[in-house]
């Protein structure tokens, strides 16, 4: 297990092939980021347009290393009780009820308030121990002895305050809980942390400073073709080239939302279901809603479909 | 190499990539793992650690290419390619001299000959008690490899602190300084001395040195140019930006428009990042019973964590009325530019242009780029004498219904009404209906009441009147707009 992990991350080539084995086609930057993240113990902040495989990367890395992937989905209003830990209040209450009798025995013979309190102190803070702690994703990740991949998805959706909350975790791999103390990750098996952001707002400098910054752009035709091949192997080569050319041409256009890789893959799957051998304008028009998600875009593109299809056919 | 990294970080900083010392340390740590051998890997690593958003990545890209390509030449003795280069050029020289052995009077001797000649010169030099640095540069020029020359140039550059260069007019100065540092004076003396002697060999050598010197000057100039781009270009740009921010917008020349546009975008971006944080007022206001119940269920229904109905800040709804008659059009241009750059935080901007008749230009600005939109606006609305009364009437007729207590109306104009009816009562009506009316006037306050200006009547019907004639003013106004909305 231990060996496995080191081996997979030993060189950049190893990461490349490892990910490719899981149908995740990485480029030079992506592999370098994973390599550095492991060797420098630094979290990776992944930015890029939606649908280029940001989340997928974290999952694939976890898969490759055979460790668990703990995911924390961010949203507005996410706070520490949902991200780090929470006291099991109900359990605490229940236990006090049950132990009422025992408490009586313990306090038996104590005279006056001061003495009782002193006696109680001898038993320490039983109710604020790990027994009564409900760990949430961040803490779970630290407690994972074998190491894990922690995926903090869409950080940009959370509040500014939450970002600051992450800082301790990200720079030192530890969390402080006032009642218990500091919880640290296993120093040899620190979690690999991936943060993703869709850039709906700027992430604070403090957070960025602690991370490696990986920007995943839309892939070029070659890479995209490889990705489609890995994900939808049933697509014949001819069609694959056509549809990649088509999508690449679409990205050049001025659209509200340009199709991402995930759309390309969906489209490829759809075309396979329709038993398509080669693109034609009519078919493209009918399946346009798979790749374009705004009526406006569909309207503006449908006029050009013939031209684009011809281009894609000629290009292949 | 550490010094090189530090230098590179410095270059990045001047190019407005924010790099903290901690990040520099990270780079050092990362290099332990990746080494310098693989250039692509090295670059990826640095890019990941230093440039932290897409724009910075772009800047990083250019900086890296400029900085480290140069380094290759500097370290020519180590890398194979460059020393090959040097040999190539030597070979070239030999070839050259072979081609025209008895060509021009100052034609080069063969490689071997030149070595002998300068050795002889050396001996003579010491005979004639010329200071030793004289031959040092001469020797370097004639005998040293190109990489030696580069190293000595870089050293000289460091000695005269060429990285302190700020504006392009300093290029000549630094070229001269570096040449001096490399011992130009000695070389110069040597050349003159040799030319004065009657000996033909001496004179030939002098000519050769002269040519080498000129070549060196070109190289040094090149070097300074590169350094200038690395270190000072941005510095000079900052200087220019500061200046442009303060200059009166009406005095801007057309060629500056592009720069100004860039500045406006930058300023807008700053405002976006300041104001994009939507504040909520917590611990205040009404008790949110539903939320409290739900939240306290985990405490067995004991209410000890109360939730309040929080108030979300509204994005301001802005209506912007711009005078586009000749005198004020430049201001309108930049105000509109500003507002549309802020689309992220004030999505609802409606803009109107007028000189006499009012027309809505919102769509125009959304659909086409700024230059075109502005040109079209000017064409459609720019002619005719200003008539504020007519404008207000048009506004009342067409848009008054859309004004509500969340609307901020910005009017930009000099309020010079050509002695027409000001119709201030309509403005009053707008004043009562809207959240805020801001009047921006490009003229200084002292001129507001002079001549046909109607500020006296309009002023009291506005929540705020401001002088606004430079980018700094504009920025303040827009920032205020956002602050009050919050």
Image: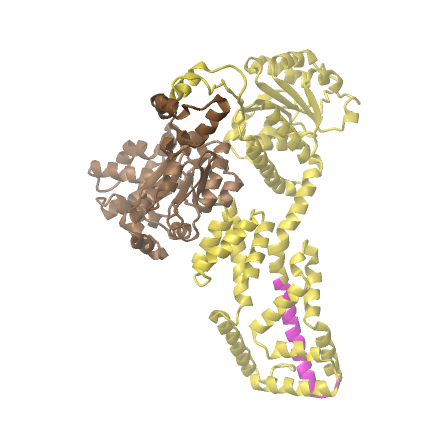
Chain colours: A brown, B yellow
Point out residue B384 in the picture as x, y percentages from the top left corner: 67, 24
Q: Is residue B39 above or below residue A251?
A: below
Q: Main secondary structure of the magenta part?
A: helix
In front: A108, or A65?
Answer: A108
- Reply yes or no: does residue B204 show up in magenta: yes
| Residue closer to the observer: B317 or A107 | A107
Span shown in magenta = B197-223
Task: State yes or no: residue B109 in magenta.
Answer: no
Is B76 on the left-hand or right-hand side of A174?
right
Left or right: residue A288 versus residue B140 is: left
Q: Nearer the viewer, residue B126 or B198?
A: B126
Residue A234 placement, left or right of B234: left
**Position above or below: B402 against A199:** above
- A283 lies left or right of A128: left
Q: Quadrant of residue B356?
A: top right
The image shows residue B156 at horizontal and vertical percentages of 65, 67
Task: Tell me: residue B292, above or below residue B132.
Answer: above
Query: What is the x, y in percent for residue B81?
Result: 47, 70
Number of numbered discs present?
Answer: 0
Q: In this rendering, is residue B478 above or below B179?
A: above
User: Could one spot residue B266 in this view of the protein?
Assistant: yes
Residue appearing at x 28%, y 33% in the figure: A287
């Amino acid at each position: 297990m231990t060996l496995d992990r080191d081996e997979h991350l030993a060189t950049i080539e190893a990461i490349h092939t490892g990910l490719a084995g899981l149908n995740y086609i990485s480029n030079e930057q992506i592999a370098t980021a994973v390599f550095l993240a492991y060797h420098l113990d630094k979290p990776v902040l992944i930015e890029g347009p939606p649908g280029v495989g940001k989340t997928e990367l974290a999952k694939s890395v976890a898969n490759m290393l055979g460790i668990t992937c703990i995911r924390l989905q961010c949203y507005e209003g996410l706070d520490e009780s949902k991200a780090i830990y929470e006291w099991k209040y109900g359990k605490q209450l229940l236990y006090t009820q049950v132990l009422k009798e025992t408490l009586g025995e313990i306090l038996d013979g104590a005279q006056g308030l001061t003495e009782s309190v002193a006696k109680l102190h001898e038993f320490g803070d039983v109710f604020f121990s790990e027994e009564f702690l409900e760990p949430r994703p961040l803490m779970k990740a630290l407690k994972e002895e074998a190491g894990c991949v922690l995926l903090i998805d869409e950080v940009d959706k959370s509040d500014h305050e939450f970002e600051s909350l992450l800082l301790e975790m990200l720079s030192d791999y530890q969390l402080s809980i006032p009642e218990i103390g500091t919880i640290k990750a296993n120093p040899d098996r620190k979690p690999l942390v991936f943060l993703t952001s869709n850039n709906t707002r700027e992430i604070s400098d403090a957070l960025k400073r602690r991370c490696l910054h990986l920007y995943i752009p839309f892939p070029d035709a070659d890479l995209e073709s490889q990705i489609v091949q890995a994900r939808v192997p049933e697509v014949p080569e001819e069609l694959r080239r056509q549809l990649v050319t088509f999508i690449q041409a679409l990205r050049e256009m001025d659209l509200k939302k340009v199709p991402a890789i995930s759309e390309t893959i969906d489209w490829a799957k759809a075309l396979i279901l329709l038993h398509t051998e080669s693109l034609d304008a009519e078919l493209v028009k009918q399946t346009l809603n798979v790749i374009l998600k705004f009526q406006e875009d569909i309207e503006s593109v449908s006029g050009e479909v013939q031209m684009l299809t011809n281009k894609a056919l000629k290009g292949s | 190499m550490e010094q090189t990294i530090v230098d590179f970080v410095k270059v990045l900083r001047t190019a407005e990539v924010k790099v903290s010392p901690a990040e520099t340390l990270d780079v050092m740590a990362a290099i332990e793992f990746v080494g310098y051998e693989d250039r692509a890997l090295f670059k990826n690593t640095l890019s990941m650690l230093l440039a932290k958003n897409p724009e910075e990545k772009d800047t990083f890209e250019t900086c890296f290419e400029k900085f480290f390509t140069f380094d290759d030449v500097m370290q020519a003795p180590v890398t194979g390619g460059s020393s090959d280069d040097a040999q190539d050029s030597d070979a070239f020289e030999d070839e050259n001299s072979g081609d025209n052995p008895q060509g021009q009077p100052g034609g080069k001797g063969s490689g071997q000959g030149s070595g002998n000649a300068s050795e002889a010169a050396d001996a003579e030099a010491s005979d004639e008690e010329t200071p030793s640095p004289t031959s040092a540069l001469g020797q370097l020029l004639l005998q040293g490899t190109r990489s030696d020359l580069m190293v000595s140039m870089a050293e000289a550059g460091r000695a005269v602190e060429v990285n302190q260069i700020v504006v392009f007019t300093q290029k000549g100065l630094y070229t001269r300084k570096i040449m001096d540092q490399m011992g130009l004076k000695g070389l110069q003396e040597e050349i003159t001395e040799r030319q004065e002697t009657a000996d033909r060999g001496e004179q030939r050598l002098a000519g050769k040195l002269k040519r080498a010197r000129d070549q060196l000057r070109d190289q040094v100039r090149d070097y300074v140019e590169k350094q200038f781009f690395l270190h000072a270009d941005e510095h000079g740009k900052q200087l220019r930006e500061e200046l442009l921010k303060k200059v009166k917008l009406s005095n801007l020349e057309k060629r500056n428009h592009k720069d100004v546009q860039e500045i406006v975008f930058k300023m807008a971006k700053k405002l976006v990042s300041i104001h994009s944080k939507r504040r909520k007022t917590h611990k205040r206001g009404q008790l949110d019973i539903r939320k409290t119940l739900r939240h306290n269920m985990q405490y067995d229904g004991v209410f000890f964590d109360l939730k309040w109905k929080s108030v979300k800040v509204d994005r301001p709804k802005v209506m912007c009325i711009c005078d586009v008659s000749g005198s004020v059009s430049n201001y309108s241009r930049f105000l509109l530019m500003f507002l549309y750059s802020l689309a992220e935080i004030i999505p609802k901007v409606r803009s109107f242009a007028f000189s006499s008749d009012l027309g809505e230009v919102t769509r125009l600005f959304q659909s086409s780029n700024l230059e075109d939109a502005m040109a079209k606006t000017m064409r459609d609305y720019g002619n005719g004498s200003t008539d504020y009364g007519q404008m207000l009437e048009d506004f009342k007729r067409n848009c008054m219904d859309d004004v509500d207590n969340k609307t901020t109306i910005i009017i930009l104009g000099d309020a010079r009404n050509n002695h027409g009816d000001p119709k201030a009562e309509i403005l009053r009506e707008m004043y009562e209906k809207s959240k805020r009316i801001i009047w921006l006037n490009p003229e200084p306050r002292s001129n507001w009441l002079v001549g046909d200006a109607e500020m006296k009547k309009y002023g009291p019907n506005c929540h705020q009147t401001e002088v606004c004639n430079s980018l700094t003013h504009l920025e303040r106004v827009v920032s205020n707009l956002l602050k009050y909305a919050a």
